[in-house]
């Protein structure tokens, strides 16, 4: 049956509708459905186009499963399962919301229709606003809601201009039409810019990311990894798909320079703000903003494969780092580096895994982050993008300084006692992720079996 | 100062948009859109999976979709997946409002300054039944006239709002609404899965579509609209109830 | 022309969002942006001398000149999504009011 990919979206939705009938079984449903999704994805779902409703594209909606979506789905579903497993006891009230979030995230990664992307963007977005209410900071959630809604409206505006121009809403159909008729890039500037801004709000690009600080600096073990790792990975994958196929047709000449400058400035400012803050969660969130901008920069330059690997590396590392920081903040009451000094001298295993994740983000050898960084810097050099290379190198130096400073503070104790405990489940997850980062950093052969053509939409269009 | 920057920014954005759209050769001029260039022509002719020729009201039987209201056929049949997502958005908004505003203890009605009188209370019950009937009519005829599940469901919810406003001690049965909401939503996904099992595509229209223009036509479209109408009505009624109650403070 | 009116509404809404400090007014500005956007979407589908896309006993054939039905379906979805977001925003406003006692952003100094 080739339509199995729909079940990745339909089963969580069904479970969400059923779960409000009985509050008691909702958490068990959530666990069961997350597990079923992971199993379905890895064993049963085949590649190809799934047509919904029996109406072929471009008249109906279709889902698109290829290597790009598969990698995205794998990362997101597995990380979602991990975050749910660690938080299910404490956050029972959020089970139905998490089920809808799972359906929304899968829908975002699978869809091949642009209006369907808008609908699932809203589904996942509203689920994210509700997950952040667990921080008990209604003003930060309100800002997130306003900025997110404005971003989605701008995306819809850009999409409607494209419909007015070309008469179709399907991604593949639109791209093949544009290429067949040689539409000049200047006609696509306004809708491409609007769609870029719309998706950029959710993807934490400057200057639309004022919501990130409010939401992540007071996060807990549920909202922190969920927003910073799972949602960030999904939006980056979606953004990559759209940029690589549709927006790259419009980003030529002056507009490309403007976009690149904007992204580079974003990286700089994020790293500078991380450098100047002392709270662990703030450092982590600014680092996430900088890495998200680097990912978009790579997609705009056409370096698809290493951007995907960077997304995976970041998602894995940030899960570990945010879980550690949030648990420490919850047990200790604050996450100032000064007051958390010496936390790792008592929790050595957790300290080692946290350091592995940090060193991977910084890009030191032996870890996955180093392999990714080396390769994408090489690709940038091959493309003669010296300015961007310089920006990334300088920001890496700044990043190295503040991360090492943070690590030193967290390892060496001063006078005060810090009592933070991590129970067994957390430790198992941390060790597993650290091992993956180490393994992929040393044995890199499987990484090179794929290349930039994992996004096969262009291939499918060429074959008719 | 900040207001001036905001004003300049917004006006600049507006001017940019207008200039860019008027200079765009590809963007169809207002009123001169050519439907044959767009996918909509196939929706009007119902010719997505075949070529049935001209569709005539009351005469053509068993076309691929069967609804006389072409917008309904797009919303519930050709692009049914979007409607599923939209229903989910409303579901999760209602869930979020309940999460934020409800409490575990006993609730009582929010005290307002307005005290309704006896005439209002009695008259609103009469009006309630009329609005309810209009809502049900709009839902059932969604495939023949403008309207459908969403406006009809909202009308049902507004009839309940009328009862809330006219009587300051009235509280609807919230548990019943939750049950209705969950059941209606799951049935929509179950119909989609039935399409997958019976006809090998998710959300395919697998019932016979009858003659264009009859009440019992268009396959699963009236059934889906009834489910959507019930779901929307119960969700919005739940939201109204959440806003108009507050915690009972025991003295 | 109606498309100019739609863009003017969007500009009004954006200005209101950027310059207002009252939470309820920000929600209203967001709604104005969405109304302008919906009007723009419908206007993309208009055809001069076209009739409403419903087959009735008077307009009984599918060969007549209809306006574009697809943007109307898109607007149906967009309106409902706007309603959901507004409901959530108002619930958050009620929560903010019960926590801080005011709707003005300037008076909520402590925990921006």
Image (spheres, coloured by chain):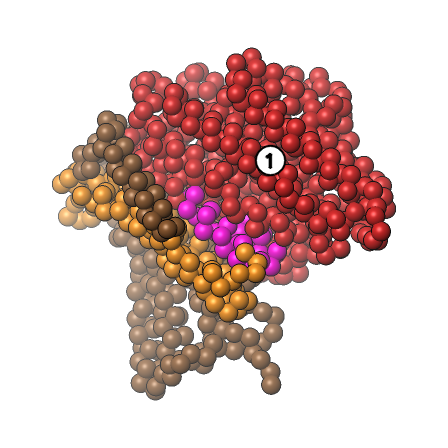
Chain colours: A red, B brown, C orange
Name the residue at the front extreme.
B1
Q: Is residue A237 visible?
A: no
Observer-nearest of A197 and B50: A197
Observer-nearest of B39 and A126: A126
B160 with respect to B213 (left or right) = right
Q: Is residue B169 visible?
A: yes
Q: Quadrant of the C terminus of chain B?
A: bottom right
Chain bearing tag 1 is A
A251 with respect to A305 (left or right) = left
Percent coordinates x, y for residue A69 in the rendering: 55, 30
Q: Using the image, determine if residue B209 lies above or below residue A363.
A: below
Q: Is residue A131 magenta?
A: yes
Report the residue at 47% width, 67% height from top: C102
* Residue assigned mark 1: A271
The quadrant in which residue A323 appears is: top right
Q: Is residue B200 magenta?
A: no
Judge the density around disc 1: few (<14), some (14-19), many (≥20) Cα neighbours within 10 Å: many
Report the residue at 64% width, 44% height from top: A277
Percent coordinates x, y for residue B227 in the rendering: 43, 55
Percent coordinates x, y for residue B43 in the rendering: 30, 37
Q: Using the image, determine if residue A449 lies above or below residue A84.
A: above
Q: Which residues are magenta?
A: A126-152
């Amino acid at each position: 049956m080739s339509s199995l990919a729909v079940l990745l979206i339909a089963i969580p939705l069904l479970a969400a509708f059923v779960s409000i009938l009985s509050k008691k079984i909702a958490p068990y449903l959530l666990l069961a459905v997350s597990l079923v999704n992971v199993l379905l994805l890895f064993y049963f779902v085949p590649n190809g186009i799934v047509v919904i409703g029996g109406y072929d594209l471009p008249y109906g909606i279709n889902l698109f499963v290829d290597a790009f979506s598969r990698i995205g789905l794998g990362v997101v579903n597995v990380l979602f399962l991990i975050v749910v497993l660690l938080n299910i006891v404490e956050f029972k009230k959020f089970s139905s919301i998490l089920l809808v979030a799972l359906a929304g995230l899968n829908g975002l990664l699978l869809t091949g229709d642009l209006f369907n992307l808008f609908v699932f963007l809203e589904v996942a977005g509203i689920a994210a606003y509700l997950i952040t209410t667990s921080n008990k900071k209604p003003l930060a959630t309100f800002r997130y809601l306003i900025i997110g809604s404005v971003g989605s409206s701008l995306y819809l505006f850009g999409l409607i201009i494209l419909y007015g121009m070309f008469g179709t809403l399907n991604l593949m159909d639109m791209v093949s039409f544009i290429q067949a008729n040689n539409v000049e890039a200047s006609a696509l500037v306004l809708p491409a810019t609007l769609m870029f801004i719309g998706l950029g709000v959710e993807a934490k690009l400057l200057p639309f990311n004022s919501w990130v600080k409010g939401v992540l600096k007071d996060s807990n073990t549920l909202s922190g990894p969920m927003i910073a790792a799972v949602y960030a990975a999904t939006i980056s994958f979606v953004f990559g798909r759209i940029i690589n196929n549709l927006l790259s047709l419009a980003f030529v000449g002056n507009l490309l320079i403007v976009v690149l400058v904007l992204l580079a400035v974003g990286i700089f400012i994020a790293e500078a703000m991380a450098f100047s803050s002392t709270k662990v969660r703030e450092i982590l969130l600014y680092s996430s903003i900088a890495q998200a901008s680097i990912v978009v920069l790579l997609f705009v330059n056409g370096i698809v494969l290493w951007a995907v690997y960077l997304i995976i590396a970041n998602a894995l590392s940030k899960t570990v780092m945010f879980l550690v920081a949030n648990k420490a903040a919850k047990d200790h009451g604050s996450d100032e580096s000064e007051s958390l000094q010496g936390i790792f001298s008592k929790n050595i295993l957790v300290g080692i895994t946290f350091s592995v994740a940090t060193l991977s983000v910084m890009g030191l050898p032996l870890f996955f982050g180093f392999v990714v960084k080396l390769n994408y810097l090489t690709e940038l050099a091959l493309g003669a993008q010296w300015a961007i290379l310089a920006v990334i190198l300088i920001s890496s130096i700044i990043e190295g300084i503040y991360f090492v400073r943070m690590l030193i503070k967290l390892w060496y104790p001063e006078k005060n006692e810090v009592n933070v405990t991590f129970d067994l489940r957390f430790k198992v997850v941390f060790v597993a992720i650290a091992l993956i980062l180490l393994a992929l950093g040393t044995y890199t052969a499987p990484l090179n079996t794929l290349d930039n053509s994992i996004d096969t939409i262009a291939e499918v269009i060429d074959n008719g | 100062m900040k207001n001036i920057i905001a004003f300049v920014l917004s006006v600049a954005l507006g001017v940019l948009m207008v200039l860019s759209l008027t200079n765009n050769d590809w963007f169809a001029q207002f009123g001169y859109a050519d439907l044959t260039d767009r996918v909509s022509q196939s929706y009007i002719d119902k010719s997505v999976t075949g070529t049935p020729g001209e569709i005539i009201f009351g005469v053509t039987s068993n076309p691929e979709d069967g609804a006389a209201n072409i917008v309904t056929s797009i919303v519930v049949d050709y692009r049914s997946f979007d409607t599923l997502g939209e229903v989910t958005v409303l579901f999760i908004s209602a869930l979020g409002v309940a999460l934020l505003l409800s409490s575990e203890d006993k609730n009582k009605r929010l005290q307002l300054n307005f005290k309704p009188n006896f005439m209002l209370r009695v008259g609103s019950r009469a009006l309630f039944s009329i609005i309810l009937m209009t809502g049900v009519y709009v839902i059932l005829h969604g495939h023949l006239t403008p309207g459908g599940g969403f406006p009809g469901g909202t009308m049902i919810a507004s009839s309940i709002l009328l009862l809330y406003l006219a009587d300051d001690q009235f509280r609807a049965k919230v548990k019943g609404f939750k049950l209705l909401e969950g059941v209606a939503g799951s049935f929509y996904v179950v119909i989609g899965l039935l399409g997958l099992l019976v006809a090998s595509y998710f959300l395919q229209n697998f019932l016979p579509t009858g003659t264009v223009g009859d009440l019992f036509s268009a396959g699963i479209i009236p059934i889906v609209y009834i489910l959507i109408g019930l779901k929307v009505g119960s969700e919005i009624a739940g939201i109204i109830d959440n806003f108009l109650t507050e915690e009972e403070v025991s003295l | 022309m109606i498309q100019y009116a739609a863009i003017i509404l969007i500009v009004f809404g954006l200005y209101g969002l950027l310059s207002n400090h009252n939470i309820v007014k920000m929600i209203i500005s967001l709604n104005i942006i969405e109304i302008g956007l919906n009007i723009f979407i419908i206007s993309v589908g208009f055809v001069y001398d076209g009739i409403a896309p419903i087959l009735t006993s008077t307009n009984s054939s599918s060969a007549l000149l209809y306006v574009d039905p697809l943007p109307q379906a898109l607007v149906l979805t967009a309106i409902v999504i706007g309603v959901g977001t507004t409901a959530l925003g108002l619930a958050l406003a009620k929560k903010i009011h019960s926590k801080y006692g005011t709707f003005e952003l300037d008076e909520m100094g402590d925990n921006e």
